[in-house]
Image: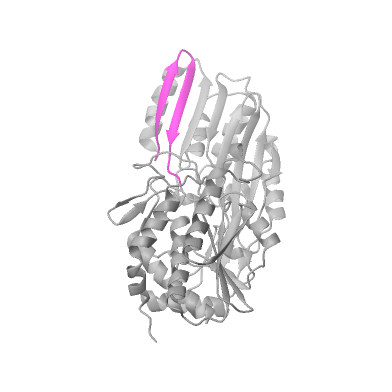
Amino acid sequence: MEINWKKEVEARRTELLEDLFTLLRIDSVRDDSKITPEAPVGPGPKEALEAFLAIGERDGFITKNVGNLAGHIEFGEGEELMGVFGHVDVVPTGTGWDTDPFVPVIIDDRIYARGSSDDKGPTMAAYYALKIIRDLKLPISKKVRVIIGTDEESGWKCMDHYLENERIPDFGFSPDAEFPIINGEKGMQTFMVQFRGDNKGGKNELLSFDAGLRENMVPQDATAVFSSPETDRIEQAFASFLENNPVKGTISVEGEQVTIELIGKAAHGMNPAAGVNAGTYLATFLNKFNFGGQAATFLELIADSIHLQHDAQKLNLAYTDSVMGELTMNAGIFTFTPTTGGEVALNFRYPQGVSEEGIEIKLEAALASYGVTIAKGGHGKLPHYVPADDPLVKTLLAVYEKHTGLKGHEQSIGGGTYGRLLERGVAYGAMFPDSIDTMHQANEFIALDDLFRATAIYADAMYELLK
């Protein structure tokens, strides 16, 4: 029997959008200030998880909440278990939105909202794919779980907890990247470059410097406050700086205190070249002036060794693997005050052939002259690769080709998806080659055509894998 998957998706279009909008209205940014035993990563992610599981329960599926950190929606019987991993937490909204990030709207056939493309929209598409298979009473021989996480954008605490308490699927995919497939994911590790707090000895004194929201986001906003006896010169130089660089900003002066706010462009940390890092641009501007102490070191290091160094070449870390591509570096968070000192979070995405230890050794050597301390950040991830001849990869690529008419091919990315949780796990959609990537950016959206086409592909692919 030939199934018209597109027609089946179209028949459920209205209810799919209603359920997705329910999720998108929930501010599910992790909030450590509101963590409780009942809300391990804050109330927003918990609410979004409960809302998704309620949709599954409403539709008659078996559901389970695993410690308010993760949960699953289950269907089918059989010895083998397939996992479809999505997440309902989102990154902070940042600035620059034309609409309310948590009031989803459809404009020009696009759904604008935080989480529309990363990852509430694709996860809902995968859920409706399973719903179609169930509704059509199609014969399957395996069990499947749509597994929902709440901490993908931070430390993956959700999946650590889930896999410690639930059966690990035998194979599966994550709808949290792009088509035709992602069967390779770079390793990830953050290193913190730490500075002491003195700011004396120069003509100008840096009072504070702040930029960035998350390690895995290119900072869109940066602010510096400093005292200076040469405010006229700085104002003139700043006007020229704005004219000659891809940033916007404002400067305000009260007596000898100067406040500069700079606006760049946010982007996903896996592709720092796609953004405009307001933090490095601001440090580069300030580095032209005479600051003292570790404040001067902070600005100089950023300007000379980090600004526009997406491949970390000046840190002697540039490396390219023939399959997984190049190492990338995103400077995601910057802080400095005279009392607390300074810190820059460098988030590395590295291919096979590179190690965390190798990055740390070269980073320490390259920055030794600055007198800084290098500290390893939290939970790192090793490179992950599923060979192109694996039946999982071959099946998913075949379904993609069938629905798009485009040739499928293997790909590796710098982002980390739940696909890497399984030895035979990959990422699969929901962005298409011609999609506009707005993940982690202001005015995030998913095109309606992409959402519905991805749902049809997921339904077909899941059925082929579950037969």
Residue situated in front as seen by the camera: 424 or 212: 424
* Secondary structure character of the magenta stretch overall: strand
Residue 117 image position (x, y, % from top left): 43, 56
Q: Residue at x 45, y 67 (%)?
A: 179
Query: Is residue 453 among what the camera can see?
Result: yes
- Tell me residue 25's x, y (percent): 42, 47
Residue under the point 38% across and 33% down: 242
Q: Quadrant of the N terminus?
A: bottom left
In this view, the residue in front, 268 or 344, is: 268
Q: Is residue 123 left or right of residue 246?
A: right
Q: Visible in this render: residue 436?
A: no
In which image quadrant can residue 424 be found? bottom right
Q: Which residue is depicted at the point 45% across and 61% down? A: 124
Q: Could you say which is closer to the camera, residue 20 or residue 291? A: 20
**Residue most toward the bottom?**
1
Q: Is residue 259 magenta?
A: yes
Which image quarter: residue 6? bottom left
- The residue stretch that appears in magenta: 246-266
